[in-house]
Amino acid sequence: MDPHHSQVSVVVIGYDDATHVAGAVRSALAQGPAVREVIAVDDCSTDGSAELLQRLAAAEPRLRVIRRRVNSGGCGTPRNDGIEAATAPYVMFLDSDDVLPPGAVDALLRAAAEQDADVAAGLCVRRELPSGRETPWQPELYAQPAVIARPSRHTRLVHDTLCVNKLYRTDFLRRHRIRFPDGRFPYEDFVFSARVLAAAPRVALVPDTVYVWHVRRSAARLSISLDRAGIDNWRARTEAHRLAYDILLGAGEKRLARAARARFLEHSVRMYARELDQRGAEYRRAWWALTRAYLKTFDAADFARAPAPGRVVARVILASAEPRDVPRLKELAARPARLTPPYARAADGTPVWSADLPQVRLDHLLERPLRLLPVAVDAELRPRARDTLLRLRLHELYGRLGQAGPEAVDVEFTHRDDGRVGLARTVPLTAEPDSESWLATMPVDLGELGSGTWDLRLRLRFRDGTSRETTAHALAGRGLLRRTAVPSARHGLLLVQPYATHAGALALRLAPGWRGLTDVMSRRAKRLLHQ
């Protein structure tokens, strides 16, 4: 008999998700004989999910259904129920609206068995629906197979806070009494993952894709990770981070605890800072106060470990009691980071955030490699029937760019959904007289791009042979970011919408032809009716 036969319990949790839960269960059962059982824990659904699961179980002996009598309010309690019910040597978790790709269990089980690992982890991809565009989660961690005898020797493990892309030895979880927080506790993964790492497991990493995380931004009920509009979401995320840090520190894992705080600055603070200008004034004040209070518990070593963009955003928050410079913070929090003017200096010539906040020093900008500098490029695109022009302006950054000598910029428009390049060209950069900036201008054939959403990507090239990949800040005002219909030889008519993304970068929506125009206007009318 195959030694990997019947070794894994897959715990599927769901609440009022009859639309998707069967697909999740089937993806687990399809993993083959390595799966001893699929334990579907229904959290007291009212939409027929439990009955659907019972019908599936009647035809599939490996499927067990547990129906909770009272809704727990979160994801932790049903997962804990699954851990208690598991009978196989290994256990893994699956959410009702996601799927396991073929071969996922075999890849993780093989690594765990061969390396005698308590935990085996693989790559998760975020799949945007309905487009199908996929983005890998923490790809650097899973670039190649690896075995980590002690997590403290590989602190990047704290960057992957997901529980679903991992296989756990069941007796390891039970022996160390590792469970999820019960009840309504958003970001329960953060705490569970900290408890796992605090127990110093032997970890095996595989480069295989083992989990597909479905992202449905138009869903009636958004997932916790997407529903960030209310301040309670940030409060819950901050508290989960705080508890995870305390768990690691309490276990004597100081390096992992500091790495967790660095990740908070680099990931969480940057992500929410990018969205601040979309929120109301009351939210911004509450977010600022909560963040500032938590950051005051950090010490110099915590900040030192974080990459510069998140660290600087945090320093600005600490330096001001009230929200300020929100548009500029959004640009710095973007990926790649963009530091927009003005570029102030202290009395001794040291780069600083602004004349009003000279205590926020930016002296690292004088030392960072050019390829990592938060260069700022402004972009404006004016759709016209003829000669639509893209105009780019590159700003000097404390003398670093002039020293390297900007020569040209590679311009690409990349399709948001499938990643194809619709237009690519290299354009020279020309120094502006009496100004610390460089200009590039190029014609854009909008008809050549076709329908869809297009992201503008740039690669700046310098005289010394170095380069820097970045995006461009979308200039607003003077009618720059407005929908325009222009004649097109290829499509007859082209509806063009330049706009700024959540991170402030220039992007472009195109709807070719009269049919495209009608579809866009129809969708807009429906949105207005539902407001």
Image (tube, grey):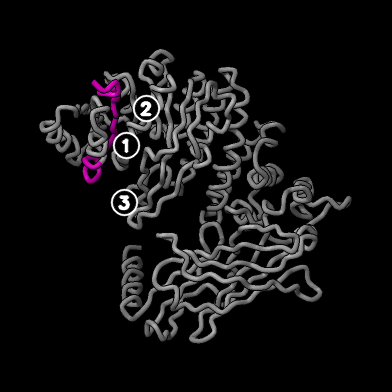
Disc with the residue nearer the chain's start (1 vs 3): 1
Q: CA distance from mark 1 to mark 3?
A: 32 Å
Query: Which mark is drawn over residue 220?
Result: 3
Q: Position of residue 43 (x, y in %)?
A: 26, 32
Q: Which residue is mark 1?
A: 103
Residue type pointed to by label 3: Ala
Instruction: Give the quadrant of residue 522.
Output: bottom left
Q: Secondary structure at mark 2?
A: helix
Is 192 situated above or below 288? above
Disc with the residue nearer the chain's start (2 vs 3): 2
Q: Which residue is mark 2?
A: 110
Dot in front, 1 or 3: 1
> Which residue shows up at 55% across the image and 42% down it?
267
Q: Please report the bounds of the magenta region as a residue range.
A: 1-23
Q: Position of residue 139 (x, y in %)?
A: 49, 42
Between residues 163 and 211, which one lies in front from this camera angle? 211
Between residues 1 and 463, which one lies in front from this camera angle? 1
Judged left or right of residue 222, residue 29 is left
Residue type pointed to by label 1: Gly
Q: CA distance from mark 2 to mark 3?
A: 39 Å
> Which residue shows up at 68% across the image and 42% down it?
318
Q: CA distance from mark 1 to mark 2?
A: 11 Å
Q: Quick check: marks 1 and 2 in contact, CB under 8 Å?
A: no
Q: Position of residue 306 (x, y in %)?
A: 65, 39
Q: Secondary structure at mark 1?
A: loop
> Per the image, is 39 magenta?
no
Disc with the residue nearer the chain's start (1 vs 2): 1
> Which residue shows up at 60% across the image and 51% down it?
333
Judged left or right of residue 327, residue 484 is left
